[in-house]
Amino acid sequence: MSDTKKYLGARIQEIRRKSGLKQSELADIAGIDSKYISKIECGRCFPSFELLDRIAEILQKPVGDFIYTEHLQSRDVLEKKIFDKLKNAPDEKFRSAYKILNEIL
């Protein structure tokens, strides 16, 4: 399975859940089979551009929001990226990052 399919599907699922819709509800509104939405969200198939545009419209998000998937990478990959950014950050930004993390964790 390609990572692109997996991440796009996971992002669609993430946005759909945040909007409070079930797969079957999104499928009904989009005019497609709920099994197809499931396949998309599981990363087994790509939606057409037309369908992605329709999903974005239903979920009231720009299509670009579905493409942003960096945060869905594995924990190991994200930890390395975070540590690299922190290691190279100037002191002021390092302290700001600490304050933000301290507030949200």
Image (cartoon, rainbow, N blue to C red):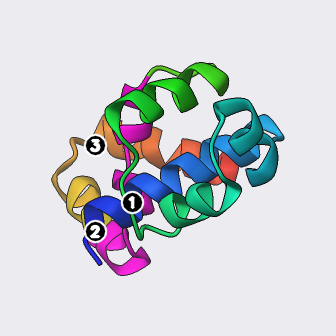
Quadrant, the N terminus = bottom left
**Of helix, strand and loop, which one carries label 2?**
helix
Which residue position holds label 3? 91
Q: Residue at x 64, y 33 (%)?
A: 30
Residue type at mark 3 is Asp
Tell me the quarter of the picture where residue 64 sits: top left
17 magenta-colored? no
10 Å crowding of disc 2: few (<14), some (14-19), many (20+): few
The correct choice, above or below, for 75 with respect to 98 in the image is below
Residue type at mark 2 is Asp
Q: Residue at x 64, y 63 (%)?
A: 35
Are the residues flagged by discs 1 and 2 in contact, CB closer than 8 Å? yes
Which residue position holds label 1? 7
Q: In the image, which disc is placed on residue 73? A: none
Q: Position of residue 51 (x, y in %)?
A: 46, 34
**Of helix, strand and loop, which one carries label 3?**
helix
Q: Which of the two discs, 3 and 2, labels the residue nearer the N terminus? A: 2
